[in-house]
Amino acid sequence: VPWCEQLSMAARALDGEAKHIRWADRAARQASAAHDGWLAALARSFAAIGRLRAGSGDPTELGDLALEFRQLRAGAFEAIMLAMRAIASRQAEDETAADDCRRAETSARTCGMRSLQALSLRLLQSREPLGSLGLAASDPEAGLAQRIPDRALDIRCFGGFELRIGDE
């Protein structure tokens, strides 16, 4: 299967459906075996974000992916994974959540990703449950695309990462 086709199939995992996540995990293993670090990292990240959306995100997995993207010299993808780790840490009520939010904010600021920086700061500054921020992933139907009060949250990955909160 051509590279772009494998990537687009792996991206289906972003919907949080188990069968799509399994496909992305398999694509990542195959890419690793073929020594294709980019496809492997992207497929793994799609699967990890899908698990997060489905409510079973693992902060450690997302942190490992951030390091993997750093090794690929892909700062923007590293920042995305750090933000996803911050969300997973908050979701799990992990004791490292505040530090994860700070790392995500710093990385997003360094990359000039203002929307991602705003999300990280919001996660850090709010003591409210993720559900009230519109970021709870416990409902696979709603996932990360729930509404933030009075402002819509829109996450896009293809064509360059874009995160919009309201009109920002």
Image: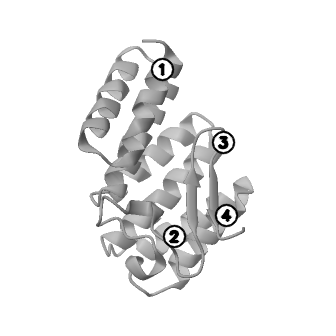
Residue situated in front as seen by the camera: 81 or 95: 81
> Marks 1 and 4: CB-CB under 8 Å?
no
User: Where is mark 3, residue-wise?
Assistant: 160
Residue depth check, mark 2 versus mark 3: number of the one nearer the observer: 3
Q: Is residue 167 above or below residue 140?
A: below
**Which residue does the image show at 39% across and 72% down from the upper left?**
90
Amino acid found under the numbered disc labelled 1: Glu
Residue depth check, mark 2 versus mark 1: number of the one nearer the observer: 1
Q: Which comes before the other along the chain, label 3 or label 4?
A: 4
Q: Secondary structure at mark 1?
A: helix
User: Where is mark 2, residue-wise?
Assistant: 101
> Marks 3 and 4: CB-CB under 8 Å?
no
Q: Secondary structure at mark 2?
A: helix
Q: Secondary structure at mark 4?
A: helix
Q: How many marks?
A: 4
Residue 159 found in image quarter: top right
Q: Give the CA distance from mark 2 to mark 4.
A: 14 Å
Question: Label 1: few (<14), some or many (≥20) within 10 Å?
Answer: few
